[in-house]
Image: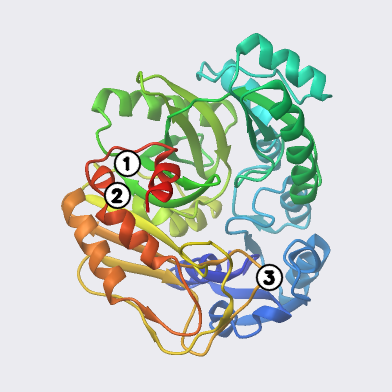
Amino acid sequence: MQRVLIANRGEIALRVQRACRDLDLETVAVYSTADRTSAHVLGADQAICIGPPPAAQSYLRIDQILAAVEVTGADAVHPGYGFLSENAEFAERLMERGVTWIGPSPDTLRRMGDKAEARSTAVAAGVPILPGSDGPLDSVEAAAQRANEIGYPVILKAASGGGGKGMRVATSRPELEKGFALASKEAESSFADGRLYLEKYLVEPRHIEIQIFGDADGRIVDFGERECSLQRRHQKLVEESPAPGLGEELRREIAAAAVKLGEAVDYRGAGTVEFLLDEDGSFSFMEMNTRIQVEHPVTELVTGIDLVKLQLEVAAGGSVPEPPEPRGHALECRINAENPRTFLPSPGRIGALRLPSGPGVRIDTHVYADYAFPPFYDSLLGKFISYGRDRDESIARMSRALREFEIEGLETTAPLHARILRDRHFRAGHLSTRFMERFLSHS
């Protein structure tokens, strides 16, 4: 592996580029016309335009990216997260051309990408799941019948894809009928697959995920857990590691289940197994993300392992190291270019910019002063990550970072995160997926 094409944009493209430089690998950036001045384009060894701003005409065009691979002579592709990162056809077509795919096999992508099949695989591996449909539902009547069997509330989910798209909660038959139509339409629009499946909906769970890593020798390890319960409309806002108040025995049980699932699909590379943890201490498999996660930096800080660099090394035939004992506490706030109260997007040209720094603060972002933040993509402006000896110190350092942050020209959600960090329930570690619902209703 000598030249890596990064099939993505924004902060993750820049993050991958930096890992490549640490390994003395050449980088190729692909970009839409809207991203011509993005930091990952300016910093690459080569850059090639793959289309106009809409993602469907650029970053999601397999043929355009394959052409870029051929033109630039790239011998490996890192997909980042989102876009084509979990697309089995893309991985397959690259591998057919002798190009190294930095990710799990196409078979693994297919098995875990189809959420209904992922559930079946989890059952076969002995990993607990929530009651739900055995596979994709062929009608709203089938959904209603299964909902009656397991009891309301239930949640409808897209059979393909993720990121909160194609999901609806229903507490009754009328809500189920309305939600089925809306979720199917959204899933079709987002993933070109309108199929849905159904699960029992837990009212107040925590969202716990395990970072796993596998190599070509079949060795699969876990690098600990992340707490991802603070969400708005199924989109994560704050993540941390380790998860507050999670007992050591329960932590080991959840991690062991994640590794078992990885072994069941012969997993290779970085992956995340997501679980719902109920109030009674029981946990259930939710889904598997077959790529690097947005929130991977918190794991990097508590383990000392560069996960993106390890992706590159494993793809080149390297081995996964023995998991180190996690140390300290890390916190990540996803700062979006949005109004902090209405959450409406706030694209625009950035004027003055002051990014925080200092002990225990890391900023992963692709923006800079005079950068025109485009309206066409995800609104993630950057990730603020803090590290401390314990959770209190990590929160204090994040609070400092948010106070130091200054930006002109657009609005961000930084003020929202500052309010969250001051909340007494957050500071006490009383977290669940309904935390933000209550927090926003009282703020």
Q: Secondary structure at mark 3?
A: loop
Q: Residue at x 69, y 80 (%)?
A: 34
Q: Residue furthest top?
A: 149
Q: For the residue labelled by badge 1, is the local secondary structure a helix, a strand or a loop?
A: loop
Give the residue type that dot 1 points to: Pro
Q: Which mark is residue 303?
A: 2
In front: mark 2 or mark 3?
Answer: 3
Quick one: quadrant of the C terminus?
bottom left
> Is residue 304 something one can see in this rendering?
no
Which quarter of the figure has residue 229?
Answer: top left
Q: Is residue 5 left or right of residue 224?
A: right
Q: Position of residue 410 (x, y in %)?
A: 51, 79
Residue 250 sits above or below residue 226 on the image: above
Contact, mark 1 vs mark 3 (Cβ under 8 Å): no
Label 1 crowd (10 A; few <14 / some 14-19 / many >=20): some
Q: Residue at x 32, y 41 (%)?
A: 323
At which x and y percent is residue 222? 39, 37
Q: Provide the secondary structure element on which disc 2 rests.
A: helix
Q: Quadrant of the N terminus?
A: bottom right
Residue identified by numbered label 3: 376
Toward the viewer: 92 or 210?
210
Q: Is residue 4 left or right of residue 32?
A: left
Residue 162 in percent (x, y) is at 63, 43
**Mark 2 near mark 1, Cβ–Cβ under 8 Å?**
yes
Mark earlier in primary sequence (1, 3):
1
The residue identified by callout 1 is: 323
